[in-house]
Image (cartoon, rainbow, N blue to C red):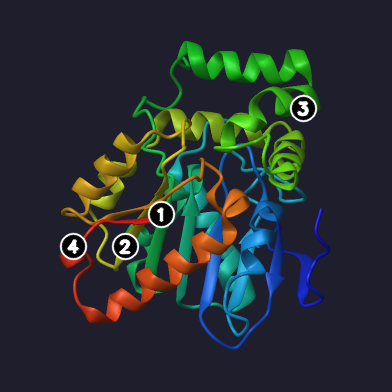
Amino acid sequence: MSALPLSVAHDTIAGISYWRRTGHGRQLVCLHGIGSNAGSFLPLLAELPEDWDVIAWNAPGYGASEPLAADWPVESDYAEALSRFLNALGLDRVTLLGHSLGTLMAAKFAALYPARVTEMILGACACGHGQVPGGNLSDAAAARLAELDDLGARAFAEKRGPRLLADPDGNREARERVIDAMASVKQPGYGQAVRMLASGQLVENLKDIRCPTHIIWGDGDVVTPRIQSERASAALGGAPITEISGSGHALHVETPAELSRVILSCLESTNEGPCSDKKEETVQ
C-alpha cells in the first residue's frame, strides 16, 4: 500500500472514527459503502486539491465507530449520526460525497438538513430495495449475512471484494485495498447496514433534494448497474450521469485521479447553470 500523506490524521469524535486531511478550502465529507470503510478514500484524498478540508467517516458500526441503537436502522438514523458528527467537528455547511450505500446516507442528510449541504456528489448509486423495516430480509440479503458468518470476514472479503473493481488482476494495490476494507466489517454494524439497504429508498429521498447534485458511475460496475444511477437521475429531474471508463464499483479506489477530475468538473459546473442543463460525459 502507498504511504499516507503526512497531513492525513485519524481520530474519533462523537462516537465516530474518521480520517481527515485538514485544509482551509472546500469542506468535503466522504461516506463509504456497505463493504468498505473510511480508509478506502485515502487514494482519493491524495488527488484532491491540497487546500480542501477532506473528511472520510467510518459509518456507525464500522471501524472504531459506535454502532447504532436500532437493530434495523433506516436512512434517517445514519443522517442524524452524521449531523452529530459534523456538529462535533464544528462544520455547518459541507459538500457531500456518497458512494454506494453512502448515497442513501447523503441523500437523506441533504433532505433533512438542506441548509447544511452546498453540493452533493453521488458515486455508484445504491437505490435500496424499499422493504418495510422489520420484515424478512430478501434471500440475497440473508445469504450475504450468512456467508459472512460462515466464512469469516477475511474469506468473505477475498471472495466478494474483487467484484468491486473492473480490473482486479491489473491493479494489485486497489485489489488489496478493497479486500482489506471488506475484511474489516463486523457485527452489528454490517448487519445494520444490510438492513438499511433493504429498506432504503434513494429515489424517494432525492425528490426532496434542492442542492446541486452530480452522479458518477464506472462503466465496469457490476455491483450497482447503471440503471440505478438512471433512476437517481430521473428523480433529480434528469441530472446528467458522468461515466468513468474502465472503472468498477469502487471508483475512489480503482481510478482516484479520474474521479478527482470529475468531481472538480462537476463542482465547477455548479456555477455555470443548472446541472440538468449539462450533457452526459464519459471520462476515459
**Disc 3 residue crowd, few under 14, some 14–19, many 20+, Cα 10 Å:** many
- Contact flag, marks 3 and 1 (Cβ < 8 Å): no
Mark 4 or mark 1, which has the lower sequence index? 1
Q: Which residue is denoted by mark 4 in the rendering?
A: 276
In-image side of 123 versus 209 (left or right):
right
Residue occupying image coordinates x 57% and y 72%? 87
Q: Nearer the viewer, mark 4 or mark 3?
A: 4
Q: Which residue is denoted by mark 1 in the rendering?
A: 122
Mark 3 or mark 2, which has the lower sequence index? 3
Mark 4 or mark 2, which has the lower sequence index? 2
- Contact flag, marks 2 and 1 (Cβ < 8 Å): yes
Figure check: 96 above or below 151: below
Mark 4 or mark 3, which has the lower sequence index? 3
- Contact flag, marks 4 and 1 (Cβ < 8 Å): no
Q: Nearer the viewer, mark 4 or mark 2?
A: 4
Residue 83: image x %, image y %? Answer: 51, 63
- Determine the CA span between mark 4 and mark 1: 15 Å
Q: Of 65 and 155, which appears nearest the observer? A: 155
In the rendering, which numbered label is found on residue 213? Answer: 2
Secondary element at image label 1: strand
Residue 122: image x %, image y %? Answer: 41, 54
Residue 118 in view of the camera: no
- Determine the CA span between mark 3 and mark 2: 34 Å
Mark 2 or mark 1, which has the lower sequence index? 1
- Determine the CA span between mark 3 and mark 1: 27 Å
Q: Look at label 1 and name its amino acid.
A: Leu
Q: Look at label 4 and name its amino acid.
A: Ser
**Disc 1 residue crowd, few under 14, some 14–19, many 20+, Cα 10 Å:** many
Residue 89: image x %, image y %? Answer: 63, 74
